[in-house]
Image (cartoon, grey):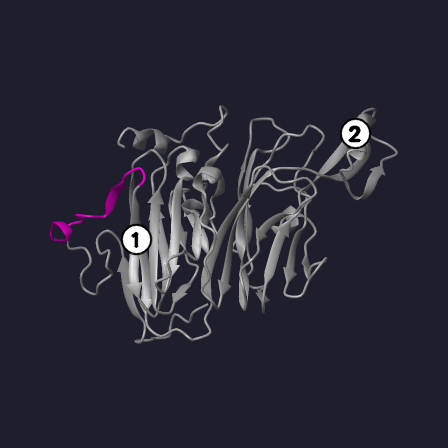
Amino acid sequence: MMDPARIDPTQEVRTLSFENPDGASGCAGQAANGRKGAPSRMIAPGERIVLGDMDGPGRVRHFWLTIPPMPPEVMRRVRLEVFYDGASEPSLSVPCLDFFGTPHGRPVAFTSSLVAAQEGRGFNCWIPMPFRRRIRLELTNESDRRFPLYYQITLTLGPVVEDIGILHATFRRENPTELRRDFVITDGLRGPGRFLGASIGVRVLPDPAFTWYGEGEVKMFIDDDDAFPTWCGTGLEDYVGTAWGMGPHHTPWQGSPLVLGPPDATLPEFVGFYRWHLPDPIAFRERIRVTLQQIGAVAVPRGESAIRQALEAEGRVAGGRFHDIPEGPLEAFGICERQDDVCATAFLYCHEIQPVERVDLEHAAADIERRDWEEASPFERALGLLF
């Protein structure tokens, strides 16, 4: 944490917004003679805008934006990219709202130590973004809707230490995952670096055999790790810090704000969760690969042994075997390999600026349309009449 009592005149504050897109000192809020003449802009379908392009050195301190509530597949088709030091390829390329911890195009209200979606409508990020020579932030509307955008980026210009980490962020999605192959949260960025954490979404695919989808372990293969990792968790909800299932909640370091499904359904359909490795830093010298297993729980009701037999015949039993239960409504319990639709936005600091794969928003937005058991929010219904 920064010391709020420290006065550092080498750090000069600047803000970027439609009221001052160049971030020049003493030049903000001039439109309409300073009477709120340009707080926002309409963003047309296919339009790319530069949110900021600043010479450094410096550091982005806070990033806030809002777009109106819209259907999930529209919300997911907005791209955020960051380019450092004049590079032609981005080092951050993600669906915009996933950057703020809200996957599946379904923002819900939550707060954490690094990102927040206040009331599910105001998107905030306090993840530090140092830059040495230059930073350019871009937003692209790849939907077929126009919408108003409001934003403000607060940064400081001033010295940064030479060995500072530069923020990189990637988006990955497998729809569906491959049976018996762990989903890769992040891989391929070179160290030295630090895995800051991830915002992860699961679209739970229907499988009547399963009573729970989240038994998979998070594993971190660091530097020379080969077949087995240095860091291994005990299950998905355990990685998020809760236990015995996972309902909606949020804390400074970890949480699951989004748990959404049809009324009376056994399993949710859309889940979103995050974990920030701030008090428990994950550093690497050369490389890191972080994965999430696709394993769920199967409770076999007494008299329905065919469920167990089918999973055993398919070779899907994980953890060694089913466990027999001598009495009660269940005859056996086991954990088994499964497939779901999983996405992850991973955040890493790397000393060396590196390009990342540009997010494919058509792929990101597939299969997340609003379900017939969902309703548009009152805000969406009201604002939809304006745009």
Residue extending farthest to the right is 326
Task: Give coordinates of residue 182: x percent, y percent.
Answer: 65, 47
Residue 261 can be seen, yes or no: yes
Q: Tell me the amino acid under the disc marked 2.
A: Ala
Q: Quadrant of the C terminus?
A: top left
For disc 1, the marked residue is 51
Residue in the picture at 63% in, 51% down: 291
- Identify the secondary structure beneath mark 1: strand
Residue extending farthest to the left is 33
Task: Give coordinates of residue 193: x percent, y percent.
Answer: 53, 66
Magenta region includes residue 236:
no
User: Between 271 and 218, which is closer to the camera in this rendering?
Assistant: 218
Look at the picture and state if 145 lies above or below 286: above
- Tags 1 and 2 touching, CB below 8 Å: no
Task: Give coordinates of residue 279: x percent, y percent.
Answer: 56, 64
For disc 2, the marked residue is 310
Look at the picture and state if 39 lies above or below 371: below
Q: Tell me the amino acid under the disc marked 1.
A: Leu
Residue in the picture at 38% in, 56% down: 82
Region rendered in magenta = 31-46
The CA span between labels 1 and 2 is 54 Å
Look at the picture and state if 249 lies above or below 327: below
219 left or right, relative to 164 = right
Residue in the picture at 62% in, 40% down: 177
- Identify the secondary structure beneath mark 2: helix
